Image (cartoon, helix red, strand yellow):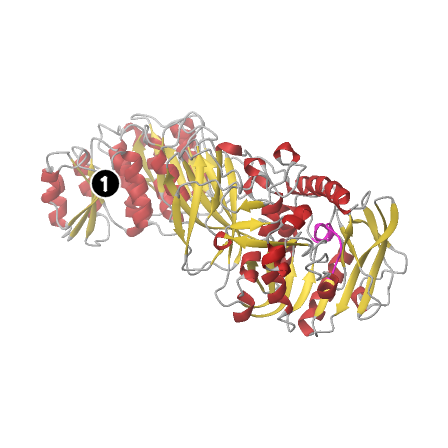
Amino acid sequence: MLKGKLVIRGIMAGIFLFLASNVTVQAESTPERIGGKDRFEVAVNISQKGWPAGTTAETVILTNYLAFADALAATPYAYQKNSPILLTHPSSLTLATKNELMRLKPKEVILAGGSGSLNPSLITEIKQLGIERVSRIDGKNRYEVAKNISLLMNPTGTAVVANGLNFPDALAIAPYAARSGIPILLTGKDALPAETQNALQAGQFQKTIVSGGEGSVSKEVYSKLPGPERIGGKDRYEVASNIFRKYFAKPSKAYIANGLTFADALTSSVLAAKENVPILLTRPSSLPDTTQNVLIDKMMTNVLIIGGTASVNNNIVYLPGKWEITSPGGNSLEGYTSATSVAPGQSLSFYVKSSKAYHVEFYRMGYYNGRGGLLTGTKTGLAAKAQVNSPDSITLNAKWNVSFTHKIPGDWKSGAYLAKLVNTDKQASYIPFVVRDSSPNADFMAVMSHNTYQAYNNWGGKSLYGYNSSNKTPAIKLSFNRPYKSGNGAGEFFAYEYNLIRWLEKNGYNVTYVTDHDIHNGILANSNVKTILIPGHDEYWSKHMRDNIENSPDVNLALFNANIGYWQVRYEDGGRTMVGYKALASQDPYNKIDPAQVTTTFRSPPVNRPEQDLFGSMYRGIPEKTMPMVVTNPSHWIYTGTGLKLGDQIPGVVGGEVDATTLTSNVEIISRSPVTLYGQKKSADVIWFNNPDGRKVFSVGTFYWNWFLDPYGHTDRASYNKNIEIMTKNALNKLLAS
């Protein structure tokens, strides 16, 4: 009879876990954009964003829409004057530019460029708009214009030198130069113009920053500059990325502009300087790898695109910071780690199979003002990697090679983490792991149930269940050296654990995180925690897990799921293989070696350690259908503040799998809800257990409790319930006080 129930239970539990693990998310939003039908309108829209109604721009700088060198050199001076840069035709204003001048009502307009670039007729046209002061920064060529602009600026001892004929390498330096009060001087590739030499001497510059590689500014020119420092790169995109990396530590956003046409980048430079953000460059329809990688490396979650969609297409920019997966990578992008948990300062190896180049984003999962996860780090530049496709026939060990190793930063907080693998097609998969404290010191210790993840994981064709194993024959041994097939690689994390974690962190509880392996390895011995939390379906425990918890009677327990610690398993290969004979326990060689470690249910011979002895209740079965939680003992302190009365019901809470108690002493029944198990009328219990060893235990006895605290991913089956929340808070407060 037991074997028959195990088959039914395996099928049903798999269905419940599968349903619970699928999370539907919305597509990613389009980044903010300042566009326009042409470069004149883009410049106007930039002006309106930087100098909106109610703000003052006493000066406006006007440049020829094709005179990129003048606009570049004018940027630092425009920032000094708090002036937008607008564009014009050589002899007449466009309607958009004219209307913007009328809106701004500046006291002065400065023409940056000689009369060959900006015709004197413009002065008359501008004055007709009621702007009396119109001046010009003149010069016989672009080099002299740049020199004359530099003479108007407050000296800093530093100048930027850029190619005056080939602008791309210089585009991204302008915001930094402007913000720093550094003038931009121009040069030829192989010859330093006399005008620039004069400017360097007149400004008494001790340092020059050369923007661009030797293809823009040669070694010969470089050698003639005072205190030169080069910011180079193999192309304009890499130069811009390198400028970002060097001069912008943690900007709030990045601007992205077309790197093939220059007007949008140049007119946005003053606004970028005002916001202290970098400008990155792109092709119209594809983001260069160097640009994409710096966005990821710098963990940029916000960009502003400069220009219309013809200049920078929609959907070419991928931003990190969104942990949810909209396009699963499937079996073409998957991986696993060398350990289930790691402490700060230690290294964790990742084994990844990817058919395309990819990067990694690391997220600590929690509430985070509803975002649900915090981006804590990234890793880029990872090439496509094939792995062997011949898992071990017994353990399903994937036997892959290490793809990369990541040292956990010292400031990473203990928590449940997801490594999000993202390939160049923006397909993604997860790898879960826990960052643990070396010596945990917290009110609560949450145990992540990676044993259960592995038991249900049928990657390679086998799990510990027949229903999802090849030939309906389960494995006896399973390796942790393989990806999780469910949850986009996250295993069962999203089934139940994530919901409680979100709620705990939203409400500010002091929680440290570990895995089953950590409990097995004795982390409680060097921990200072008041209560162990079981957020998920932690069904598979080792003997050492049970021993170590029982040997810590000063640590209370809170079970937020059902069927906890039901099956006993063993570890082999240093903890990387989990052994579970289960229904074949009579064949377990430990019957002769060490009967106490036979991998059967804890309640069965020869183990004979019923879960109820520790928890106060234990697993009873799978209800035929989801049922309400029924209030049985409304005078119990846990109901304080709810207003619930005898017989009141909270629909949908009881289901999946359920626990109940048969104890008659030391147990307080909070709720006893009717269920049908295998055709028989039974009950599911929420209990408080005063264990004779001194610890207190709160047990919800159902799969679905957490969904009513935070229904993320399960809104089709649950919704937030204030009474469940009040009961949970009352229980946790009591556990802390006990």
The quadrant of the rendering that contains the C terminus is bottom right
* Residue at 70% over, 62% down: 609
Q: Is residue 685 visible?
A: yes
Work out whether residue 689 or residue 497 is closer to the camera in this orientation and state it.
Answer: 689
Label 1, secondary structure: give it. Answer: loop
Q: Which residues are magenta?
A: 699-709
Is 700 within the magenta?
yes
Query: Is residue 290 or residue 131 the one in the foreground?
Result: 290
In this image, 48 relative to 177: left or right?
Answer: right
Quarter of the image for residue 131 reads top left
- Judge whether residue 28 can be spotted in this image: no
Instruction: Report whether 408 appears left or right of 571.
Output: left
In the depicted structure, whether residue 68 falls above or below residue 377: above
Q: Position of residue 459 (x, y in %)?
A: 56, 38
Residue 668: quadrant of the picture: bottom right
Amino acid carrying mark 1 in the image: Gly
Q: Closest to the observer: 13 or 148?
A: 13
Compared to 709, does 460 lie above or below? above
Residue on which the image places disc 1: 232
Is 474 inside the magenta-drawn segment?
no
The spot of residue 76 in percent (x, y) is 29, 45
